[in-house]
Amino acid sequence: MSKASPTALRDIRSEIEKLRNTVRNHDYRYYVLADPAISDFEYDKLMQTLVELESSHPELITPDSPTQRVGGQPTKEFRQVRHPVPMLSLSNTYSEEELRDFDKRVKTLLDGEKYEYVSELKFDGVALRLVYENGLLALAATRGDGETGDDITANVKTIRMIPLHLTLNGDTSEYSNVEVRGEVYMNRDGFQKLNQEREESGEKPFANARNATAGTLKLQDPKEVAKRPLRFVSYYLLSNEVRLNSQWENLGVLKKLGLPVSQQVRLCRNIDEVIENTQRWESERDSLPYEIDGSVVKVNSVRQQDALGTVARSPRWAIAYKFTARQSTTILKGITLQVGRIGTVTPVAELEPVFLAGSTISRATLHNEDYIRERDIRIGDTVIVEKSGDVIPAVVAFVPDGRPAAAKPFKFPHKCPVCGGPIYRLEGESAYYCENYECSAQVRGRIEHFASRRAMDIEGMGESVVDQLVGIGLMKSIADIYELHKHEHELEDLERWGKKSVGNLLNAIERSKSRPFSKLLFGMGIRHVGERTAQLLAEHFQSMDNLMGASEENLQFVSDIGPTIAQSIHRFFSDKKNRELVERFRSAGLRFEGDLKRKEGKLSGQTFVLTGSLSKMTRDEAKEMIVSLGGKVTESVSKKTSCVIVGENPGSKYERALALKVNTMNEDEFFKLVGRNR
């Protein structure tokens, strides 16, 4: 193809930009306004023309082009990013009285000033932070712990409701560098269609739209994210260059910038209007195409928001009102027992199907033996079913007038319903557990956990692969993963498999053998042993043999490990089958030695807790500095804590430190302690 002349190239560039603006406008009308101006066929023709022009002139492709929403290679992990302004969580209220108490606090703190509220819907989704630089989407991050989240920019670019390029004109040109906060969610129809597709392909359906949204945002491949029906609503704007006067103005600017804003917002002169609006949407929430679980009330004036400030990681100027759970009645036909990944035995109510909160319910949790006994729930009862948080259905009570004369109290079995082995209940706990580590009901979940990225990171061993291999009997234990190489030819003959895919899986299994000892401990699924506890155990005991030989008393010498965790670890390694499992891991060549040799330094023997935002370094950098000098960092404050390092806007950890009279210090004092200058 001959090279275009400068004049022709200018014309092509102009045509491409005109096409981009046309496509952006139609995206906005379709995805944000729900008011399409052209047919899907006509839209597809515009996009195809744009793709062809950019393919012919790749030097003219820009990051904000509508053609660049899906691109890039799958990622193995998400980069951690710090939020310069923490993403705070809201305090919850559950009654009109509590809303009025909130109003009284606002009135007192504002000392007689006039104020008003903005009432917004509380979308049941996942919080998201967007950063625009020079009008272009530069970063999208999850809330995480409020201070640090995951960089999911590539995934978020696939959400067509989110503009890659802000609409900047005379009214909005000064907003080219802003931060936008909002919520990613799914409409009910989109969620139901997604679950239907998963069931048809043999995959497990999502429990609710929020879980589906969260899981989708964490997918490693943006192309897969693009297939999911994600939507977005914005509700807050931050700018270092422009000072907004009110939340109402904030929402107006977001809309002008081309961002989707909820239409169900109301400016309220007083708390009475807030309550009226809240009650309206509680009764009409089923009329909306998406799930909401409450409303959010915000003081409108930004100046007054600043004056009210925050407390315990929540703003004093805003509050969430949670709707009451929706209920219905039906017949309890039976009680079955369900065995989870770590052997938890949960009683499940088998119900006469009943429609509740947008879905048909035929099963609901009964939590545990004590729950059933305290509420005297019996088979045959007419029961009240509730969706707690409009998510998990649960039986909450029975209707006395509907009880059959022959109904008898339920007796909890003492054998596992799957493997027939004994089940036990630890003192002080409410749940029963199956002791058989190789119980088939637990195998699938354990293998999925063991192979997960946070544990042994075996790429290619996802849910569908695990189901297939367990289903044909090739895996009955997590240790069988390291025996799969003996079945290479058998695997190649399976449906949807081949020589290359089998080779990739076996290579991933082989690579997992070099994973750190702490990851193996976490992957083994010992009850109460999460990632942090596994790391502490690996650092303290330094080897599998030392850990297996530790008494409950010795286990409690490890920071953050109390009697309950110690008992769980000791019980696990006392079981004959679990010790056999460990020996199979040893034979397979997995790492049984500690990840990090404990360093000696000026902080040796001291335990630190971090709280609040640090201004001179990230919390991860502070942790690394403490560990490099021989100290330990834990997540909770106890009498064993040596010191709490306090940053800006500290939370409940600081309050607990004061209550326990634990030593505290600020950043400057910490740098002086470690002998560093910043």
Image: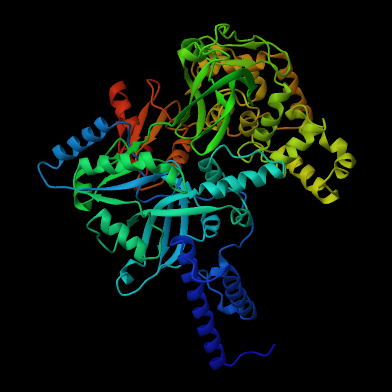
- Quadrant of residue 44 within the rendered picture: bottom right
> How far across and how far down the image is residue 172, in percent?
32, 69
> How far across and how far down the image is residue 486, in percent?
87, 35
Q: Is residue 437 above or below residue 217?
A: above
Front-lying residue, 239 or 667: 239
> How far across and how far down the image is residue 437, in percent?
70, 20
Q: Is residue 120 left or right of residue 594?
A: left
Q: Is residue 284 left or right of residue 151?
A: left
Residue at the location (52% across, 9% down)?
427
- Color style of the picture: rainbow
Q: How many marks?
A: 0
Visible residue check, residue 330: yes
Q: Is residue 117 left or right of residue 398?
A: left
> How far across and how far down the image is residue 595, in percent?
61, 34
Visible residue check, residue 648: no
Front-lying residue, 659 or 241: 241
**Image quadrant occupied by the N terminus:** bottom right
